[in-house]
Amino acid sequence: MDAARLKESVQQAGEALQSQLGDDLGRVQEKMEERVRRGAEQARGVLSSVNQQFGGLVQESPVIVLAGAFAIGYLVAKVARAIR
């Protein structure tokens, strides 16, 4: 085998490898996109459920929710002052 044929063979192998890697990366990207899409849908469902539950709690006992929000704000302010 002469040098020209060897060079051509190496180039062909490199092109084939590059093509295969591109295909593999495309499949990996598609799988990752699908997983992210499913995760986002699940997160949306969970957040919607939490929102509905919290909305029901606010409607049933707004005074308790308001007192809880005040207490949390107070604690956050205390922690913020302590950190300074």
Image (cartoon, rainbow, N blue to C red):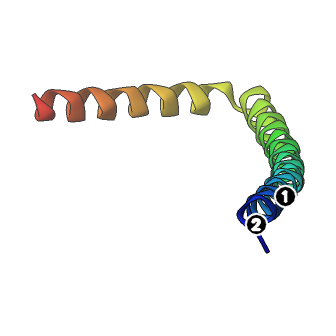
Residue 53, placed above or below residue 26: above
Residue 5, placed above or below residue 54: below
What residue lies at 86% left-to-right and 59% top-to-bottom?
Answer: 16
Lower position in the chain sequence, tag 2 or tag 1: 2
Does dot 1 land on a helix, a strand or a loop? helix
Q: Nearer the viewer, mark 2 or mark 1?
A: 2
| Front in this rendered view, residue 1 or 42 | 1
CA–CA distance in space, label 2 to label 1: 10 Å
Q: Which residue in the rendered view is the most extreme toward the front?
A: 2
The N terminus lies in quadrant: bottom right
Does dot 2 land on a helix, a strand or a loop? helix
| Front in this rendered view, residue 34 or 51 | 34
Label 2 Cα neighbours within 10 Å, binned few <14 / some 14-19 / many ≥20: few
The kind of residue tagged 2 is Leu
| Front in this rendered view, residue 4 or 20 | 4
Residue 48, placed above or below residue 33: above
In the rendered image, residue 6, in percent from the top left (x then y), is placed at: 76, 66
Residue 12, labelled with which disc? 1
Label 2 close to label 1 by CB (< 8 Å): no
In the rendered image, residue 62, in percent from the top left (x then y), is placed at: 67, 25
In the rendered image, residue 46, in percent from the top left (x then y), is placed at: 81, 46
Rendered image quadrant of residue 5: bottom right
Q: Which residue is mark 2?
A: 6
The kind of residue tagged 1 is Gln
Left or right, 79 with respect to 28, comes to: left
Left or right, 69 with respect to 19, comes to: left
